[in-house]
Image (cartoon, rainbow, N blue to C red):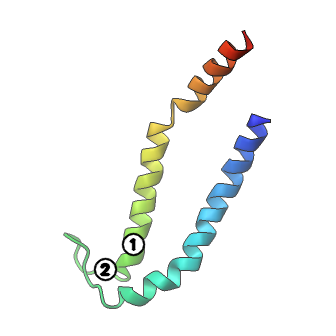
Amino acid sequence: MQFAASMEGLGVNPVSAGMTFIAFLPVLVRPSGNVTKLLAIDEIPHPLVVAALLWAAFGTVFLALMGIRVPRLAFQNQRVEAA
């Protein structure tokens, strides 16, 4: 049951996040016309959209690195509970 729930989450969550990003894309594009630069980056088209994509990529990599040990720990926990 936990495996099925995990697989469902792996399929549904990325699609949901992508749909949310697509839904809010016009909200990010409209004020991007007033913003021309992001910190040290020179002028780029639609900087708020680029910033959102970079932040999402950073968050994904960070959480993947932090959560890489979770499956092994969950397995060990289930083994102890079964014993």
Number of the label disc, if any, that sits on residue 50: 1
Q: Which residue is mark 2?
A: 44
Tag 2 near tag 1, CB within 8 Å: yes
Which residue does the image show at 64% across and 23% down from the upper left? 75
Task: Give the camera-side residue of 77 and 16.
Answer: 77
Lateral position of residue 48 relative to residue 37, left or right? right
Quarter location, residue 45: bottom left
Q: Tag 1 or tag 2, which sits nearer the N-term? A: 2
Position above or below: 33 against 65: below
Q: Secondary structure at mark 2?
A: loop
Position above or below: 4 against 24: above
Give the x, y percent position of residue 7: 73, 44
Give the x, y percent position of residue 3: 75, 36
Q: Amino acid at mark 1?
A: Val
Q: Secondary structure at mark 1?
A: helix
Mark 2 or mark 1, which is nearer to you? 1
Lateral position of residue 48 relative to residue 60, left or right? left
